[in-house]
Amino acid sequence: MQSTISVEDHLTKIYALWLREFKVFMREKSRLVASTFTPILWLFVIGSGFGAANPSTVPGVDYQQFIFPGIVAMSIIFSSVFFGSYIIWDRKFDFLKSVMVAPVSRGSVFVGKTLGGMTTSLIQAAILLAIGGAIGIPFTPLSLVQDVAVILLMSFGLTSLGLALGSYMYSLEGFQMIVSFVVFPLFFLSGALFPLDNLPGWLRALTAADPATYGVDALRHAMLGVGSNSIGFDAAILVGYTAALGAFGIFSFKRMKAV
Amino acid sequence: MIRIRNLVKKYGDLTAVDDLTLDINENEVFGLLGSNGAGKTTTIHMLATLLKPTSGTATVNDYDIVSQPAKVRASIGIVFQAPSSDDMLTGYENLQLHSMLYSVPRHARRQRIEEVLELVGLTDRRHDQVKAYSGGMRRRLEIARGLLHKPKVMFLDEPTLGLDPASRETMWKYVKRLVEEEKVTIILTTHYMEEADMLCDRIGIIDKGKIVALDTPAGLKAGLGGDIIRIKTKDSIDRVRQFDFVHKVEQSDGFLVLSVKDAKKALPVLLQNVEAESAEFASPTLNDVFIQITGRNIKEQAEGGFMERYAKYD
């Protein structure tokens, strides 16, 4: 009985923290517009531009369609890791202090915040999926379920990463480093823009270490039926990475200073 | 309600709180008075479990701040120096968020939120985003937020810092109302003398991390030895000295400055016997007490003490 009450209590607190993130996101329309516009630009400019020069990356799939799963992954990488910077804002405006002084476990604070980040990533991805339908991605109910599962896994892992890194920082300027050293490598090494099969060895090794690689590959399997690994292998690695990054996030939040 | 025992907080070589021992009683309004950097905020942060003491400990509502932080947090409400509500949310939404974080039962939430909004006079503005609030309104929202879960102890850290005089007086009004309507022990830090004088039952003057004086406001002032009378007269200092209610006489700028126990009784007697061109009297203020005890004026140091800034990066 005692534990039932306490589980419900934890969930209420997590819900409260998530609801705050969601409301703030819905009120900051410019954030949504800006972060959705960039992937669309990539899809149409890079997709059409390189597509004209290099028409046969994978037989039967044009280049724009080929990079579409990569662009969805890009949107998740950027929005999820960037979301980590909001923990720095929370600290700057003392909101974080007001949460830390409440009887809420650090784990709940982390989960509430992460769910908020996942929600924003999912909304942006949903907009891109709709555009995907328009450029001829052959969605089926099964592939959509797979897509959403991969999107949630990726965004959970990468939001955890962003929040964990953000928890060690006191200035937004410092977070710019994360963009150069984390966000861009995650994206460029993920195979979002090129197939992994004929890469030089050093590049192949780097792509293999990038968690986003498995997200992109899984999405490509689900959407287009092509990929470098088996979808089961992708899913297993993705789950492993997500669990590890989630643990890193909780660890970081537990050791974060309150004031 | 609060028992502080040998509490110490050091930042490297710097001792922010130095072996502090203090008891605060139930339903008391206790003021920690000190200049910036005296250790007030550091003390509050330790009592609220946001900072770990270097040594020593304290109990709040009978829970130990080091070994039972979760229970301490559920027992306290706190208003920070800088407002900490989310300004993208409305006042009501901020309160809703915190009522859930503080486990206020679902069926009681709405009513409790309305109660605290009413208490701080924000009912009319509850559905406005906090970014449209004035500084005073934001502080009042913080007080409302701190009260949601009916805490046993409420910490107010410089509740009127940076407010204009009118908002400050409004704030005092609400703090007094809070004392009357909610059964809660209040610990308030301030470096405004009149604020401490007006609101507090007892005052601890803190200087360099130590409590250097502890009494009621009246007791502290009485400790200075009564009132001061300044008269301008051609009579000699010896003529004034003969009255036995005069403890001490000094000459200063053509005035005679007399220390007396009670100026209201002494002055008429004096005026009947001494030919005075002018006379005035004053009761000592807490500022006089502060200068007497610490040897410094409280306003000498700049806003935003070095210690507070330092503490942020601990």
Image: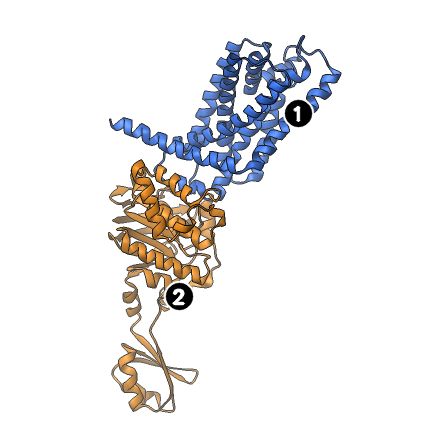
Instruction: Label 2: state its secondary structure.
Output: loop
Q: Residue at x 26, y 55 (%)?
A: B28
Identity, as a three-letter code, of the amino acid under mark 2: Gly
Q: Nearer the viewer, mark 1 or mark 2?
A: 1
Classify residue A66 by image quadrant.
Answer: top right
Please tell me the colour of chain B: orange
Letter of the blue chain: A
Number of on-image labels:
2
Chain letter of disc 1 in the image: A
Identity, as a three-letter code, of the amino acid under mark 1: Trp
Furthest residue in direction right, as rendered:
A53
Q: Which residue is the site of mark 2?
A: B295
Q: Quadrant of the N terminus of chain A?
A: top left
Is B300 in front, or is A238?
A238
Is A45 in front, or is A212?
A45
Alpha carbons under labels 1 and 2: distance apart:
68 Å
Q: Position of residue B5 (x, y in %)?
A: 28, 48
B176 versus A46 height, above or below: below
Q: Which residue is the site of mark 1?
A: A42
Q: Position of residue B17 (x, y in %)?
A: 37, 50
Instruction: Label 1: state its secondary structure.
Output: helix
B245 versus B94 height, above or below: below
Q: Position of residue B203 (x, y in %)?
A: 31, 59
